[in-house]
Amino acid sequence: MLEKTSNPAFSDSVFNNLSFTYGDTMTIKGTANKALTLLATILVAALATWKMAYAGNALVTPLMMGGLIVGTIFSFITIFKPEKAKFTSIVYAICEGLVLGAISAFYEMSMVDPTTGEGHGIVFNAILLTIGVFFVMLYLYKQRIIEPTRKFMIGLCAAMGAIAIVYLVDIVMGFFGSSVGFLHSSGPLGIGISLIIVVVAALNFILDFKNVENCVAQGAPLYMEWYCAFGLMMTLVWLYLEMLRLLSKLNRD
């Protein structure tokens, strides 16, 4: 049985029509290897736009926007066609890398002190914190310290719904030159909101891990290793971006 989750990659609609088999089936190790492959792809692509941003290359913004659009398209293709995940997840990872590299560079450069030329190293710190949180959540799940109970799932999905609504309102207000103030504020409220979002993003890993484990137990087909790895990357990317936002607020004058 698949757990209800706020991660669209692990939604019920994806698994309802999934045919489980007794042939080549997915494994935990195989899924971990695929996840590492996608993560490496993201990092290589991110390094490209990171270097371009620091070199002042005018192509970095078109690459970032193109990566955002194409990555979104391929994420939906992957969700609706899990059997194609071996190919579509790689394209998604490349696009996400292009976006993350540019965004990370822009964040890092925005934090440089104009008088001393020194930065705060928030990108490096965000990467370390994201990796640290991932392994902490994996440990908490493996030790069953946090159990994906029904109440846990309902609460997490409700929190995700609230966050999604705030993001949507912020995007709509952006078209009119405004924004949701507390979402971008570096004051106590803004920092508190960011902390809550980081916690919600981190807790999504618990459900992701449970769904991977369930797929393996039910003998999901081999291509689901790529699909589940893709789902884990979606949560990882979201957590990193929220961590980056939080650190930028904490280091803002």
Image (spheres, rainbow, N blue to C red):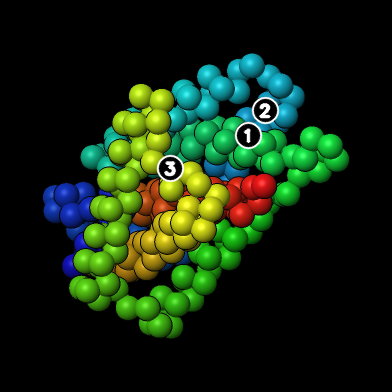
User: Which dot marks residue 237?
Assistant: none
Where residue 165 sits in the image (x, y, percent)?
27, 45
Q: Secondary structure at mark 3?
A: helix
Q: Are marks 2 and 1 in contact (CB under 8 Å)?
A: yes
Q: Residue at x 60, y 43 (%)?
A: 43
Where residue 29 sits in the image (x, y, percent)?
46, 64
Seen in the image, is 181 located left or right of residue 222? right
Along the polypeptide, which appears first: circle 2 or circle 1? 2
Q: Amino acid at mark 1?
A: Phe
Is 14 drawn above or below residue 53 in the view shown?
below
Pointer 2 residue = 53
Q: CA distance from mark 2 to mark 1?
A: 7 Å
Pointer 3 residue = 181
Which mark is in front, 3 or 2?
Answer: 3
Q: Is residue 90 visible?
A: no
- Locate the N terminus by quadrant: bottom left
Q: Amino acid at mark 2?
A: Ala
Seen in the image, is 129 located left or right of residue 14? right
Q: Amino acid at mark 3?
A: Gly
Q: Residue at x 43, y 48 (%)?
A: 182
Seen in the image, is 132 located left or right of residue 117? left
**Closest to the observer, 83 or 234:** 234
Is 214 drawn above or below residue 11 in the view shown?
below
Q: Are marks 3 and 2 in contact (CB under 8 Å)?
A: no
Where residue 49 sits in the image (x, y, percent)?
63, 30
In the displayed image of the protein, which residue is found farthest to the top?
58
Q: Residue at x 60, y 48 (%)?
A: 248
Q: Secondary structure at mark 1?
A: helix
Q: Are marks 3 and 1 in contact (CB under 8 Å)?
A: no
Along the polypeptide, which appears first: circle 3 or circle 1? 1
Q: CA distance from mark 3 to mark 1?
A: 21 Å
Pointer 1 residue = 106
